[in-house]
Image (cartoon, rainbow, N blue to C red):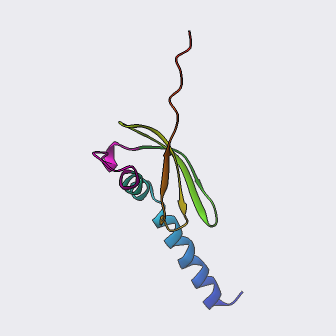
Amino acid sequence: MSVRLAVTATITLLLAACASSIENVQRETARSIGGDVLPDKVVVKNLDRGVTSVKWDAETSKGRYACSADDMMRRVLCVKSPATAPTP
């Protein structure tokens, strides 16, 4: 592997890791949900960083959401999870 290719690969991986840091995930989750959801009040769970996508679950004051985005945290989509019925 050439040095140039290794440097390019390293920079790409670092940018992808930075793009999906917890703070960025919280901010983009709040932005996707909208309203009065504050980034620091978003609890991120099950963060799964793939090669070309990121998936996670989020808990907010508005409910629970299943979220996904591309590897650079663009095109974030958060879908509210249906409320679970109380068990008798």
Q: Position of residue 1 (x, y in %)?
A: 72, 86
Magenta segment? 30-42
Q: Position of residue 81 (x, y in %)?
A: 52, 38
Q: Is residue 48 above or below residue 64?
A: below
Horizontal side of 81 relative to 35 (left or right) equals right
Q: Residue at x 64, y 66 (%)?
A: 51
Q: Quadrant of the C terminus?
A: top right
In the displayed image of the protein, which residue is found farthest to the top? 88
Which image quadrant for residue 36?
A: top left
Which image quadrant for residue 7?
A: bottom right
Q: How many marks?
A: 0
Viewer-side residue, 1 vs 48: 48
Q: Position of residue 26 (x, y in %)?
A: 40, 52
Q: Is residue 37 above or below residue 13?
A: above
In the displayed image of the protein, which residue is found farthest to the left? 36
In the displayed image of the protein, which residue is found farthest to the right? 1
**Is 52 a magenta residue?**
no
Q: Position of residue 20 (x, y in %)?
A: 48, 61
Q: Residue at x 63, y 60 (%)?
A: 50
Viewer-side residue, 61 vs 51: 61
Q: Residue at x 35, y 36 (%)?
A: 61
Q: Is residue 31 above or below residue 86?
A: below
